[in-house]
Image (cartoon, grey):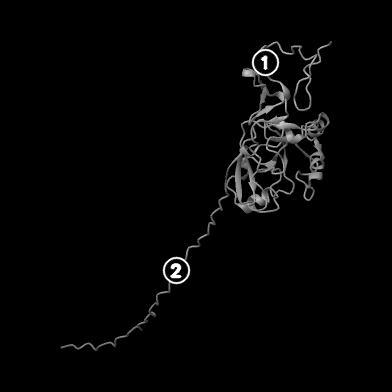
Amino acid sequence: MPNIGVRYYPFGLKHNGYNSVVTSTNPGQKIKFQGQERQDELGLNWDSFKWRNYDYAIGRFINIDPLCEKYSTWTPYAFSGNRVVDSRELEGLEPIKPPTPTQLTEIQICTGTTNCANERLAPEGYTNPQPYTPNSTTKLYEGGTESYVRLSTDGVTQPQGRFVVRPEVIEGKSPVEIQELLAMPNTPTHITDVNAQGASMVEGPVNGSSVKGTMQNEILNRLPAENFTNTRLIPEMPVIETIVPVVPIVEPVPVAPEVIIPDVVLPELPIIIP
């Protein structure tokens, strides 16, 4: 039989009968279902995801979901939200729908001067206004060690979300200035540090920004809550008052009127000769 690679049932149990073929030259290679490490020592036979361990024989995790409070209608042991056909498990936390090759192509097209980024977000309600400046250039890239921050409004938006910016974009600006710069519908109150290392991201100009060409960043794959840290209030910028020096009013010193002394003509005295 030709080498067709290892085949799995939807929940990860390996097919029997033709999966004995070795697809790696490294006998110690244990990266198996969904790219996770298989723990077969001591007869464990489970897959080690980042946040918990998974028993592919029963299709359930053997540890409680760290995000179970967010998904109260699910069993805390569910694998990929029981959506094993159209989704995959995100590191033992929740299901995520991976982009298809067609979707990736559509995202990559957004690196040109097109409106496909706005069209892609329209079904999610991002229509008025559109997130990106129409007929502009966007760039697809992978987040590295760069720093990002997320801006949120208390009671309106969450500290976790897809749109972030580089911290230098808002450095030294007040909440109102940030709102105008990023064309936000509400004045932001909090700022959160974001670890986007390894995330697929799109960068493009903010539509309606007070400064033309201001860039924002969109995280394409959902990040765990642990990647959003150090939420804090945005400091209000101090109001610098312009102090106008008070010039004292100097009353003029009265000047005495000039006294004009008239010329005195002395009478001539007679000459007396003795």
Q: Nearer the viewer, residue 136 or 16?
A: 16
Q: Nearer the viewer, residue 150 or 204?
A: 150
Q: Is residue 146 above or below residue 190?
A: above
Q: Nearer the viewer, residue 86 or 214?
A: 86
SS at mark 1?
loop
SS at mark 2?
loop
Q: Nearer the viewer, residue 81 or 168?
A: 81
Q: Position of residue 196 (x, y in %)?
A: 65, 35
In space, the residues marked 2 and 1 are separated at their CA atoms by 87 Å
Q: Position of residue 230 (x, y in %)?
A: 56, 42
Q: Nearer the viewer, mark 2 or mark 1?
A: 1
Q: Position of residue 265 (x, y in %)?
A: 32, 85
Q: Is residue 43 above or below residue 197?
A: above
Q: Is residue 73 above or below residue 56?
A: below
Q: Split into 4 quadrants, where in the image is the N terminus? A: top right
Taking 51 as reference, is 137 left or right? right
Q: Are marks 2 and 1 in contact (CB under 8 Å)?
A: no
Q: Identity of the amino acid at label 2? A: Pro
For label 1, the crowd category at 10 Å Cα-Cα, with few meaning under 14, some 14 to 19 and many 20 or more, is few
Q: Mark 2 highlights which residue?
A: 248
Q: Split into 4 quadrants, where in the image is the C terminus? A: bottom left
Q: Position of residue 84 (x, y in %)?
A: 78, 31
Quadrant of the image occupied by residue 54: top right
Q: How many marks?
A: 2
Determine the residue positioned at 67% across, 52% down: 156
Quadrant of the image occupied by residue 212: top right
For label 2, the crowd category at 10 Å Cα-Cα, with few meaning under 14, some 14 to 19 and many 20 or more, is few
Taking 13 as reference, is 198 left or right? left
Determine the residue positioned at 29% across, 86% down: 266
Q: Which numbered circle lies on residue 157? A: none
Q: Which numbered circle lies on residue 29? A: 1
Q: Identity of the amino acid at label 1? A: Gln
